[in-house]
Amino acid sequence: MLKIGVVIFPGSNCDHDCQHIFKNVLGQYVEMIWHKETLLAGLDAIVLPGGFSYGDYLRTGAIARFSPVMGAVKGFAKKGGLVLGICNGFQILLEAGLLPGAMLRNKSLHFICKDVSMKVENAATSFTSAYESGQVLKIPIAHADGNYYTDPVTLASMQANAQIVLRYCTPEGKVTPDANPNGSLDNIAGIINAEGNVLGMMPHPERCAEAVLGNDDGKQIFLSMLESLKGNKKQLKMIPA
Amino acid sequence: MRPISPLMTKDLIAQHNLTDDEYKKIVEILGREPNITELGMFSVMWSEHCSYKSSRVHLKKLPTTGPRVVQGPGENAGAVDIGDGLCAVFKMESHNHPSFIEPYQGAATGVGGILRDIFTMGARPIALLDALRFGGLDHAKNRHLVKGVVSGIAGYGNCMGVPTVGGEIVFNDIYSQNPLVNVFCLGIAHKDKIFLGTAAGVGNPVIYFGSKTGRDGIHGATMASDSFDDQSEQKRPTVQVGDPFTEKLLLEACLELMAGDLLVGIQDMGAAGLTSSSCEMASRAGNGIDLDLTDVPRREPGMTPYELMLSESQERMLMVAQAGKEEECIRICKKWDLDVAVVGRVTGDGILRVKDQGQVVAEIPAKSLADDGPRYERPYSPPGYQDMLTNLNYDALPDVKDASAALLSLLESPTIASKRWVYEQYDHMVRTNTMVRPGSDAAVVRIKGTNKALAMTVDCNSRYCLLHPYEGARLAVAEAARNLVCSGAEPIGLTDCLNFGNPERPEVMWQFVLAIEGMKDACEYFKIPIVSGNVSFYNETNGLSIYPTPMLGMVGLIESADKTMTQWFKQNGDVILLLGKTKEDLGGSEYLKVHHHREQGSPPLLSVEAEKMLHDFMLKVIHDGSVQSAHDCSDGGLSIALAECCISAPDTRRGAVIKLGLDTLRLDALLFGESQSRVILSVKPGMVDRVLNSAWDSGIPATKIGAVGGDRFVIDVEEGQWSEGCHIDLPVDQLYDRWAFSIERTLNGT
């Protein structure tokens, strides 16, 4: 059994959902990690869940990145540990510098909660290996600040390194401006770091990982992680940084 | 007693919304004149909002018991047994007045307040629904209110991580000067771990925790118990400001406190703040409380005892802990970064004694504040205009000429149009339980750790209630129950939020009394207990009352979550059946309002017997797997319900070809009349005979009216005695476009 750590920041609200997937759906051991912890021992992967850490009263993720636990998360990532940030977790990863770029308010200036279509652009990562490259998923988003932005140089380098792992698209898989729900640069829904062990994504795979909820398109994100941790990963073709 | 207190003058008493008789009663209770702090405390606790002084004698008539009821009215929320050792804890509350004065904060704190009511009971909130009423969107002010209220609900609920899974919105100009914001919340608790608001155990510590106390919301309860006029916006400082982040911490801290063996009782500081929480907890236990304000955490210096006792600052709680467990309670609150202080002790003398800086500033029998408020049996009589409302000469109304155009304009009328623009701003999926999202007859959430699911709906047709308060209330109960059974759920409990005008007007009181009678009769017949509720009077501005709006929130249980049903057509080739009888029921219909600008006539008649037979039948055919979809016919009638079956699915739209006969009906009554106890089913072709026979055996009228398929919405109506019939043939995409984007277009002015 693998040991997955789910961090609880003050204001996290998808912590139980992530725990539920790993524990009850996938049968793994889950440790809930209070944000004031500084030592993380024996974990196989860390999840930064969605929510409104510190109320999002400042820029999203801007306060959470100072939480004591983030030092340990950075150390874990530096040693190659798998870190998945979903929604607010992605925003925290950006603020913490574990992933490049920043989040702006959605183009509509509204919170948006709905299913969108998303394309797996790179199926050769530890988070997406259970998908086929180019596979289109139906997956929910729920955020007010998912409008990803970065500078042109970083964008070009991410594009060249296949770090843009997930893109918003039409149900047919076309990456078009109309299929972009929040104005995100290059239709970015999720990116990975150059080393391939830290993934941030705005959509919520934990909300579509059980047939009883009518959609389990997101389940393979977690299965990919487990397979990768068990060493059964298919040959990953990440271009080294 | 502290000597510095202004002399009681008639003005001062009137400013506190107390009548001369009420003041005399206070003097009698105390055996002396009250000081200003005491006057303030009486004024909020004896306000209509807190004391239910005009409604209590009538509310007592409602059925509140049943085999599943674990907690009925009188606590923070009601609770019903759902098996597996679990309870559904739920309640609905209004935040109408604050939302009109300041829509964002008014609605946000409405959500915050109802959430606290639920988690105070030891339940984790898992679903929110909102019932909203606004004036027409052609007025800029109403558009502003809609946007503000929706953002406020989203801002608070989303941050809390409690999904807003459903609700309803009706637009009518009668609500222009007095919108309604009613929020329903449901949580899940262990049956043997329900917490109550009681200050038992003399000597036990009283602990304050949560946000600091500020000067916001002072006299909120009194404001909510008054009518509005043009100066109402000056009351903005009485609206509280919400902080959902602190509430989220408060929720987690409460549940952690409750998981240990630490607490005796707990209550949130809602309306009337520290005053209500302390005196109600003491009164329920037959005890008193010595409260010391010195250590109450506060936002600013110089706050008087009057302000501290009356502040309605949000996100605050009062708990009575077991003696000796103070330190553990404080540790947990501090873990969650909350302010916390021991502010008093439970006493045996029944007195709420408030001290500040060593001086007693108030000394009042707790029971007199909480329970001995005035009770009024206010006079009631029907308004003089009632007959004018009900009498409608249908012969003077021309039948519909262009049925297609009428259908399209009804579909895009904001009351019927899709509320997509609204619910996409609410996180309706967090906690990963949402099986049926907003947009079907009822929302459905699964209960983790069991095979069960709960269905929830909020309903009230206030136009029916205006035209006939008794029938309108019965119809609301019937419709709510029908929405649940169409989702595969058996109704198990009800909460109400009774929004009415000024109870001092006999015609308003008449509406109230009749509505209570209607609810009572229907709930008794359907055996659905009312376990919690709220009354909101004084919903009037410049003398104009809202329509009587007894909003209902009903909860249903689905024993096996895989039996959950939705309203939209599932498969081409499926056969469409209509259950129930279509009669000449145009009175009070949405069609009459939209096309003839009349809100008149008698609402549809309800036969509770026929309705109950329909419910039993629906549950049977859904549970034995005979049907593919089920949709209740309500606003807009048969043609709108059929259109909704075609266009309301989350990702696919389907066409349908329908054939209807008129016989002696008017065409508009057939297409748009709102006869009750009707449901549209779709079934696989092989199941048609079985379902029809089964319906007839159960005494339910059932007819085959068409089939699912294609990309057009076709209704053929054959010639009848009074009408030549019609032929509607529209692309489904056109129906969808008019229905799905209407509200968004209106709000954006496009």
Image: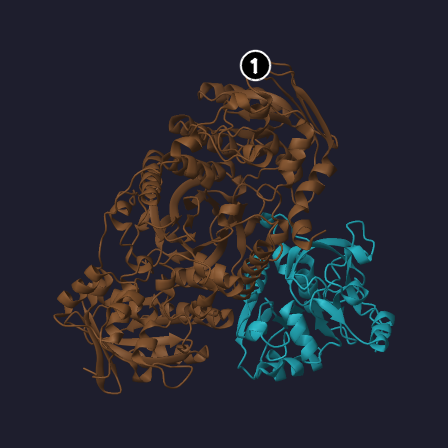
Q: Position of residue B51 (x, y in %)?
A: 28, 58
Q: Quadrant of residue B668?
A: top right
> Is B3 placed above or below B237 here?
below
Q: Amino acid at mark 1?
A: Asp
Which residue is identified by label 1?
A: B663
Residue under the point 34% across and 43% down: B512
Residue lying at the far left in this picture: please name it.
B31
Residue under the point 53% across and 60% down: B153
What colour denotes chain B?
A: brown
- Horizontally, residue B401 falls left or right of residue B166, namely right
Q: Position of residue B157 (x, y in %)?
A: 52, 62
Q: Work out whether residue B461 can be spotted.
A: no
- Horizontally, residue A198 falls left or right of residue B578, namely right
- Image quarter of the C terminus of chain A: bottom right
> Is B246 placed above or below B513 here?
below
Q: Nearer the viewer, residue B676 or A23?
A: B676
What colour denotes chain A?
A: cyan
Q: Chain of mark 1?
A: B
Residue under the point 34% across and 81% down: B296
Q: Quadrant of residue B9?
A: bottom left
Q: Position of residue B369 (x, y in %)?
A: 23, 65
Q: Work out whether residue B557 can be spotted.
A: yes
